[in-house]
Image (cartoon, rainbow, N blue to C red):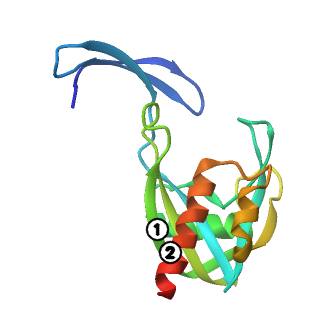
Amino acid sequence: MPDILATGIVAKSGLFTVESLDLKFSNGELRKYERIKGGGRGAVMIVPLIDDDTLLLVREYCAGTHDYQLGFPKGLIDPGEDAMQAANRELKEEAGFGAKSLTELKKVTMAPSYFNAKMHIIFAEQLFTESLLGDEPEPLEVVRWPISQWQTLLTQADFTEARSVAALLLAKEHLISRAN
């Protein structure tokens, strides 16, 4: 692990803080890195299974790509919540369902060279209808997708977010291993 010699704030906005790191590596090499400083609470992405063969996805506006993307419900873990509580809350806010059964499939990072952000991918089953008011600026479109058509989902022009792709593949593997 390189030694951190100094840190500083390069830029700050309402959402992001860019931090600089002056590092010294074990071979004596000195480098300056920049990263988006995370809040540390983490986030969740939920793969909801409404019945034995139907996934729930949401289509929502994404400012980074300025388009609508199809993906799984997701959101930040609020103060005082654990990942499972956040997953159930986000599922209720974004898809209008709660889950009686939640299983963590994997914790993933996003661009770890630049972000200290962790996301828990949660598989949700035994869904029931329940809605909570979320923070989305417009209602999200809830899309039902047959899990048997998972390969077709991968070809959809608006299903491109790497975390959703990873979540789909992890969920598919989870179902296969559970069946064996």
Query: Is label 2 in a helix, a strand or a loop?
Result: helix
**Which residue is found at the position 74% from the left and 37% from the top?**
63
Query: Where is residue 65 drawn, in percent x and y?
Result: 74, 36
On screen, residue 156 versus residue 125, left or right, reads right
Query: If the image is split into quadrants, where does the N terminus sit?
Result: top left
Three-letter residue code for mark 1: Leu
Q: What's the CA distance linking mark 1 and mark 2?
A: 8 Å
Specify whether 29 is left or right of 83.
left
Q: Disc number at residue 149?
A: none
Question: 42 or 171, which lies in front?
Answer: 171
Q: Residue at x 41, y 45 (%)?
A: 40
Residue 174 vs 8, above or below: the answer is below
Looking at the rendered structure, the kind of residue marked 2 is His
Q: Answer few, some or many: residues within 10 Å of disc 1's Cα (few below 14, many 20 plus, some between 14 and 19).
A: some
x and y, in percent, of residue 166 in the image = 56, 57
Q: Sequence-wise, which precedes: disc 1 or disc 2?
A: 1
Note whether 163 is above or below 67 in the view shown: below
| Residue designated by label 1 | 105
What element does badge 1 sit on? strand
* Pair 1/2: label in front: 2
Q: Residue at x 60, y 48 (%)?
A: 162
Disc 2 crowd rating (10 Å Cα; few below 14, some 14-19, many 20+) is: some
Q: Is residue 174 visible?
A: yes
Image coordinates of residue 125 in percent, x first then y, are: 59, 81
Residue 66 picture location, percent across and down = 79, 36
Is residue 130 visible in the rendered image? The answer is no
Q: Front-most of 176 and 117?
A: 176
Q: Which is nearer the eye, 152 or 114? A: 152
> Label 2 near label 1: C-beta < 8 Å?
yes
The correct choice, above or below, for 125 with respect to 74 in the image is: below
Give the numbered dot on residue 174. Answer: 2
Residue 121 horizontal side relative to residue 56, left or right: left
